[in-house]
Image: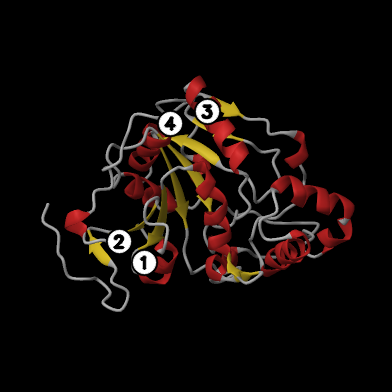
Amino acid sequence: MAYSCVPWIESTGLYQYGTRFCYQQPSLYNPGHHAKMSLKEEVIIVICTRLDSIRFPGKAIKPICGTKALDHLLNRIEASGLKTCLAVPKGQAEAFSSFLHFREDWLSLVEGNPESPLHRSLEALTYFVPTPKYFVRITHDDILIDTINLMEMLEETIKRKVGYAYSPDIMAGAGVEIISTENLAYACKARQEPAEFLSYFVKGTNCPNPAIYKYQPRKSICRPFNLCIDYKEDSILIEAVLRAIGKNATVDQICYYLDTHPYLLNINKQPELSIYTCAYNAEEWIRE
């Protein structure tokens, strides 16, 4: 493949080849250059992120305690040592290019399907050589990822050779899903329509690897607290907690702090009735 050596964005020096972006001249950049047969080379973290969320527009770049929400997430998962890819809609790479600074050895940026995180995730995986057997799915709503839980869950997933793994008991905002690439590829082929929620399509008896594993995290991080950023109030709660105990507080420390300061949970208390549409920005179709 011939690569252009002309910067895609002259002001940033960001180069483009295909839908992938990096700060190194593309002809010198090989995504699989350091590939080795190990756990860390068989797995990629994929973070689907975008700017156009109606409930909380631009939440990925909103500052929390002076640090962008997505930076909080990236700072936490760096300890995993896993290669990571930001999968963004076509046309939004420039808005996320700053997150590559000082992370180029493990972080990539790929543009893809603007309407379907399902298909965009597969597009992101195809840019890695060799194609990973599994990927860790993290949404930009979950910025307080517990890396210990992630790695323990990953080891068990690979050992058990399952197609899908999750840990539903962990505090919301700290958990991940682990999905086999073959299940993702099957789901993308079987479903041509855009899909916002991958979980419904990458597991089950119809998938090439139907085995599902429910991982049980340590008790200290299993709480019913919601620290997933769906609304502005969620970010306010996270900021209140991190300002009190520090931006680098562990999930254990966050859970303990909320155990001892439960009144803070009123900040983002859920309504008595919620309507879950499972459809991207479909509020206008809901009627009384």
> Identity of the amino acid at label 1?
Ala
Q: Of marks 2 and 4, which one's residue comes earlier in the chain?
A: 2
Q: Position of residue 282 (x, y in %)?
A: 55, 63
Gap between marks 1 and 3 measured at Cα: 32 Å
Select label 1 or label 2 by which is in front. Answer: 2
Pointers 3 and 4 in contact (CB under 8 A)?
Answer: yes
Q: Which residue lies under the disc numbered 3? A: 155
Mark earlier in primary sequence (3, 4):
4
- Point out the frontmost of discs 4 and 1: 4
Q: How many marks?
A: 4
Q: Disc 2 on helix, strand or loop? A: strand
Q: Tell me which label, 4 or 1, sits earlier in the chain.
A: 4
Q: Are marks 4 and 1 in contact (CB under 8 Å)?
A: no
**Label 4, on which residue?**
39
**Res 21 label:** 2
Q: Which mark is residue 228?
A: none
Which coloring applies here? secondary structure
Q: Is residue 172 above or below residue 206?
A: below
Q: Position of residue 138 (x, y in %)?
A: 52, 48
**Residue at the spot x=61%, y=48% of the render?**
145
Mark 1 Cα-neighbour bin, 10 Å: few <14, some 14–19, many ≥20: many
Front residue of 64/35: it is 35
- Point out the tag, 1 or 2, that comes first from the N-terminus: 2
Type of residue at label 4? Leu
| Depth order, front residue of 7/53 | 7
- Determine the image quadrant of residue 56: bottom right
Mark nearer the viewer, 1 or 3: 3
Tell me residue 48's x, y (percent).
46, 55
Dot 4 crowding, Cα within 10 Å, few <14, some 14–19, many 20+:
some
Residue 181 coordinates in the image, percent (x, y): 38, 35
Disc 2 or disc 4, which is closer to the eye?
4
